[in-house]
Image (cartoon, helix red, strand yellow):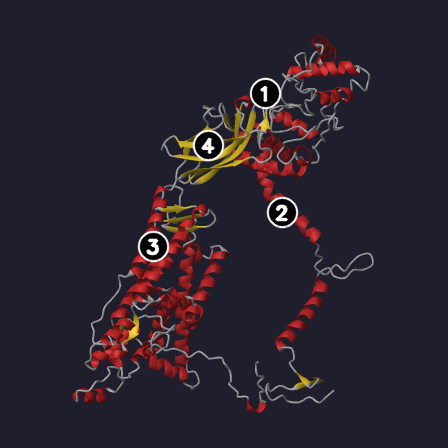
Amino acid sequence: MAESELDKVSGKTTTGHQWDGIKELNTPLPRWWLITFYATILWAIGYWVVYPAWPLLWSYTRGVLNYSTRAAVAVELANLEKIRGDKMIALGAASLADIEKDPALLALARARGKAAFGDNCAPCHGSGGAGAKGYPNLNDDDWLWGGSLDQIVQTIQFGARSGHTKTHEGAMLAFGKDGILKRDEIGTVANYVRSLSGLSTRQGYDVAAGANIFFENCTSCHGEAGKGNQELGAPNLTDKIWLYGSEEATLIETITNGRAGVMPAWVGRLDPSTIKALAVYVHTLGGGK
Amino acid sequence: MNKIVQINPDQVEDVGSLYAARKKVYPQSVFGTFRRIKWGLMAFCLGVYYLLPFVRWNRGLGAPDQAVLIDLPNSRFYFFFIELWPQEVYYFTGLLIIAALTLFLMNSVGGRIWCGYLCPQTVWTDLFYAVERLIEGDRRERMRKAASADPLKLERISEIMLKHSNWLLIAWWTGGAWVLYFTDAPTLVKELVTFQAPAIAYIWIAILTATTYLLAGFMREQVCVYMCPWPRIQAALTDEWALNVTYRYDRGEKRRSVKKANELRALGLPAGDCVNCYQCVAACPTGIDIRNGPQIDCIQCGLCIDACDNVMKKIGRPTRLIGYDNDINIQRRMAGKPPIYGIVRPRTIIYTALIALVGGIMLYALLTRSLLDINVLHDRNPVAVKLSDGSIRNAYTVRFLNKRGFDRVVTIDIDGPPYAVLHVVGDDSITPDRPMVVLGRDSTTELRVLVTAPSEKNSERSIPIKFRITDIGLGEVASAIDNFVLP
């Protein structure tokens, strides 16, 4: 290493490093930079003391502030509930019919209901309540268990075939699997059911036999005219809405294997005012009775 | 081939620092036409700024009665009889276009009129200079005090403190007036003096006090010279016809003493009118010499004109050796021709026409704007619902805007698919087939609207549907178009 010397052009000293005759000027870090650098080191030490920092074998240093992001989230959620508190109390106190008459409460219930719907109901019923095969469309005017506000609340609370003691019971029997009807009888009654809502039928099917099979097996739940029964969740067979589909093959499948879609009970999982808001939201989607 | 130049380190010249320290300016007080104009405009501008928030304007019960109010929490802007909603922000765009064009027009007629007379930086700096002059004395006295190396005497300290406290008072008042534009002014004044105003008001007053104090008390002409973009733009926009504050060198040169000039004139020889008294430099608030020609530092306030005129009067020479003039006329005078002025020329005509056009469009838009409006948003999921009787229902979220200061009732009609029926969720009006909705004053109302149409009557996949609302009292109509979709 060569000697450090004074450079004439820049007026600085060199570091003494030299490569192929090129010398390096000594340009130390600016003082402010160095001070900032040391200050950040000191700051980091302070940080270790105050905040959680070092992993231990089965735990970690918690810091004197005892700060935890998880606790912070819990506090924020509690605050949110507090902010919503008064309004949600107003929602809880109002009767279902009053909510729909009061524009402010209706807007609140719809907003809250929409959020709760997205969180809890959308996986089955779809984000807009449009449903899917086996999952009812909540926008239409056809209801398995009734479309009044009270009936919707009842269904949300206890579900359908959910196992809850107050749940909606009643299921479509497996007429084929259980040997109640023979294969050709099922085909005949499927065509008869299609005729109830004006759908086309297989040419030459035995109408009288179909009516007879229907009368003997189906009317106890679906009614003599096939209008269904909301007490039992038996769908109206005369309208244009089909939960599983109206094709002959689908109907044969339904009659053969039965149907028993399940909706969980939400009581206990959602608070009463949220269920109320959900009911209002579903009711105002358009199909409410 | 580039030649490699070898630099001998022993011959490198030290140019020193390239940084130029600011030379402090001590403008001399001036009397004259342009000073009077400046006082008048200052009084007018400050008067408008400080007093406008207190002007009242009756808009009826429940609405703010402040003539000019920017109501941020409720997102409304009030300007006398005009009330603007956030979606009408394009009026401000129009105002900004007009402001820019007016600036261009001013520039093409009389140079930097904005800089010299109207710009807040000029107005407040001028005011701060006036305070400084009143307390510390005129130019020479201030320069002497600044240069004095004597230890500070009590008198000098109290002078400095008096100056700064007065500056701060003006600055505080400036910041205070600003916040009054954002809420009811008399109420806020009451809250401010009883220390019950919201913290944000005090914070903004503090910020604007600081900026006013710094910009007008310390930065002064540096704002115009170094920070402001307008001098650069102005220099590019100006033309040979624009009247700028100009030293008429055809008359002024060569500069001589009064005595020498008189001797020459007695002999019938030409002599310049400029006597090198430096009064124009002394009066200049940006500390330049106008005799060096047009320059970016010159804000064209006209104070040098007054200063020079006073000298010319004293030595018995014609005034306006410095005046609003242009190079064309200097050249014409030197060639012995009379001056000509081209205020009406294509440039000014085009600017005026554009201002009139934009202003006209804005006025037309303002006068014909609808105070009733409707927006429709079609449900996206599901877009259409089949009902049990086979008919099709579409749901829409409809937002009604009532910009009037009173509640009103509108009916909703639809033109769309044949036999379509309208229903408003939550509505139980006595006219279910033509629902009536109450719209609160100065607000929006959002409703869910269902349209149901029999499917066998409609074979199109998508049918345009028009929602029309009619104010049953005033007959005002608004409409929006969407589509009715089949599944």
Q: Which callout, 3 or 1, points at the residue further toward the start of the chain?
A: 3
Residue A151 visible (yes or no): yes
User: From the viewer's perspective, is B163 left or right of B385?
Assistant: left
Cα–Cα span, label 4 and label 2: 44 Å
**Chain identity of mark 4:** B
Secondary structure at numbered mark 4 = strand
Residue depicted at x 20% and y 80%: B317
Cα–Cα span, label 3 and label 1: 61 Å
Q: Which mark is residue B389?
A: 1
Secondary structure at numbered mark 2 = helix
Which residue lies under the disc numbered 4? B466
Say yes or no: labels 1 and 4 on the same chain. Answer: yes
Cα–Cα span, label 3 and label 2: 55 Å
Query: In the image, is residue B445 above or below residue B233?
Result: above
Q: Report the front residue among A103 and B357.
A: B357
Q: Which callout, 1 or 4, points at the residue further toward the start of the chain?
A: 1
Mark 4: give few (<14), some (14-19) or many (20+) Cα within 10 Å. some
**Chain identity of mark 3:** B
Of labels 1 and 2, the one closer to you: 1
Cα–Cα span, label 1 and label 2: 48 Å
Of labels 3 and 1, the one closer to you: 3
- Mark 1: amino acid: Asp
Q: Are the two marked residues, 3 and 2, in contact with CB atoms closer than 8 angstroms?
A: no
Q: Position of residue A24 (x, y in %)?
A: 67, 83
Which residue lies under the disc numbered 2? A79
